[in-house]
Image (cartoon, grey):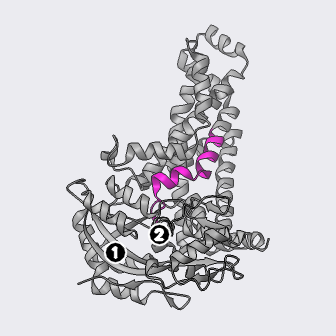
């Protein structure tokens, strides 16, 4: 009895020690699921971590929540993709030093037989109109992520208020939404990065792509130390310089999944 | 169907491979869960005993409240925890958000009502003559409580086992207060959620098996403790 008890105690004490300790400097970044799930961050972060002896803590959530965490000062830097929301974040004084990092694009995916006949639509807006007319099942992220914001932008441009049984709001990340689209033989708007990562696992095909409206730029923003004095602004700035500098940009350009480049660096000098 | 079988295979392979990432996740889960269970037991068992042994006004109401607290969804605890621990929140200065200690704190809140409640029930289930006898024999209140807890140790240990099972298997608190940070606050449950979201069902299932094996180990130890054997 005593021995078991002491083992428990020792375990608990080491657990506490380990939980409290850890002295290495940490930079906290909130970002979108697409950068994490695609695997980009696992190649982009290590060179920076090694060179500066820091650990970058990644909190991968949707763009909406990422910016919210920045607003509350819970992270030091945000790396997201929703230009209007980013600009508002900066204009409200929560963020500074916003820089372009890279872009990819959105694609409209769906089942091969394409029941709503969106293949051949000239623009993304046209494709969305056909989706609404055909009342084919469409899975929406419904989570205020960058992708969801882009989707609402497209519905608005098409002059449609998506409603009805065909419009399914999943409230989940990109992966689960693609999964659901596959299971229900439905359509979805996806960022190309996540879609390529899932290609081969799911029987979905790209039905509309290439329109300018589907452009998907990513930006990086430091949390304003004037709003939250405790954020690690200097380290955040260093990280931004790395990601937008030649070294980080090269890592992004060289990053490939299934032999395809996912993100295109476009930081301005 | 295929991936269920593959999940079992992968679970064995994962555990046998001693992948440092996987073990770190297992270790983090154990750390935060054991710490939370320990603290909740240290606070909850005496508190449960106290409520059981004392007579006071509002006791039934307190019991109903405690019962209700057991139904608190973990996401709500996570949400409340976030509100308190965020830099904008009242406890923001502690900088516990997105750390293992922060998860532990949330898990403690989850475990406490369970421990208090089940200890309370355990003691109320004992023979009422026990306490009268203790008192008549001149035991101090602390001696009385100790005796009663010893008498009810099976049920009290069961309370701790239930609390541990709840904290190690929950995902809402670990996700909201830990942030699922790789190599820092990723726990078994948040890792399973992530792998599922990535479509890696086999890996998710394999991690689920690992979690069960770990729980088996801890419960084995608690069982020995309960039996009073060394």
Label total for image: 2
Segment tinted magenta in the rendering: B160-185
- Badge 2: chain ID: A
| Spatial separation of the CA atoms under disc 1 and disc 2 | 42 Å
Near mark 1 (Cα within 10 A), the count class, few <14, some 14-19 or many ≥20, is some
Q: In the image shown, does A225 or B47 lie closer to the viewer?
A: A225
Return the disc, 1 or 2, that comes first in the chain's sequence.
1
Observer-side mark, 1 or 2, equals 2
Residue with the mark numbered 1? A49
Q: Position of residue B101 (x, y in %)?
A: 43, 50
Q: Nearer the viewer, residue B148 or A178?
A: A178
Q: Which mark is residue A157?
A: 2
**Residue B208 placement (x, y as % from top left):** 66, 62
Establish if B130 lies above or below A113.
Answer: above
Q: Residue furthest left?
A: A226
Quadrant containing the C terminus of chain A is bottom left
Report whether A140 appears left or right of A62.
Answer: right
Label 2: state its secondary structure: helix
Between A83 and B159, the residue placed more toward the observer is A83
Q: Is residue A73 above or below residue A118?
A: above
Q: Chain of mark 1?
A: A
């Amino acid at each position: 009895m005593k021995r078991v008890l002491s083992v428990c105690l020792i375990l608990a004490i080491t657990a506490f020690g380990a939980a409290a300790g850890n002295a290495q400097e940490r930079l906290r970044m909130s970002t979108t699921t697409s950068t994490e799930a695609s695997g980009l961050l696992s190649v982009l972060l290590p060179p920076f971590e090694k060179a500066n002896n820091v650990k970058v803590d990644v909190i991968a959530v949707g763009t909406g929540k990422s910016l919210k965490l920045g607003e509350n000062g819970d992270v030091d830097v945000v790396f997201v993709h929703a230009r209007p929301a980013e600009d508002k974040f900066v204009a409200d004084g929560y963020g500074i030093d916003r820089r372009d990092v890279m872009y990819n694009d959105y694609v409209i995916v769906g089942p091969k037989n394409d029941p709503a006949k969106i293949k051949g639509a000239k623009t993304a807006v046209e494709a969305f109109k056909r989706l609404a007319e055909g009342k084919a099942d469409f899975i929406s992220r419904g989570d205020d992520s960058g992708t969801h914001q882009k989707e609402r932008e497209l519905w608005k441009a098409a002059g449609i208020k998506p409603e009805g049984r065909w419009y399914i709001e999943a409230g989940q990340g990109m992966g689960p939404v693609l999964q659901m689209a596959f299971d229900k033989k439905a359509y979805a708007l996806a960022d190309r990065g996540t879609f390529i990562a899932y290609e081969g696992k799911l029987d979905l095909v790209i039905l509309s792509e290439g329109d300018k409206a589907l452009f998907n730029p990513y930006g990086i923003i430091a949390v304003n130390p004037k709003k939250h004095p405790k954020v690690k602004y200097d380290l955040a700035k260093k990280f931004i310089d790395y990601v937008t500098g030649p070294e980080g940009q090269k890592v992004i350009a060289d990053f490939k999944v299934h032999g395809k480049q996912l993100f295109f660096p476009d930081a301005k000098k | 169907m295929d991936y269920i079988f593959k999940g079992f295979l992968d679970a064995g392979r994962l555990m046998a491979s001693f992948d440092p990432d996987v073990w770190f996740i297992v270790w983090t889960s154990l750390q935060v869960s054991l710490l939370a269970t320990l603290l909740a037991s240290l606070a909850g068992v005496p508190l449960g005993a106290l409520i059981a042994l004392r007579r006071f006004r509002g006791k039934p109401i307190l019991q109903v409240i405690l019962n209700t607290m057991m139904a608190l969804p973990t996401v709500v605890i996570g949400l409340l925890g976030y509100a308190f621990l965020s830099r904008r929140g009242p406890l923001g200065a502690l900088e516990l958000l997105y750390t293992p200690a922060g998860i532990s704190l949330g898990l403690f809140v989850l475990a406490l009502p369970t421990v208090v409640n089940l200890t309370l029930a355990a003691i109320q289930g004992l023979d009422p003559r026990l306490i009268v006898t203790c008192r008549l024999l001149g035991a101090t209140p602390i001696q009385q409580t100790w005796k009663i807890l010893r008498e009810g140790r099976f049920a009290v240990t069961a309370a701790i086992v239930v609390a541990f099972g709840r904290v190690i298997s929950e995902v809402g608190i670990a996700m909201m207060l830990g942030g699922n940070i790789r190599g820092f606050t990723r726990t078994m449950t948040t890792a399973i959620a992530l792998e599922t979201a990535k479509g890696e069902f086999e890996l998710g299932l394999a991690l689920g098996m690992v979690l069960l094996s770990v729980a088996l180990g801890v419960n084995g130890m608690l069982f020995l403790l309960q039996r009073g054997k060394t």
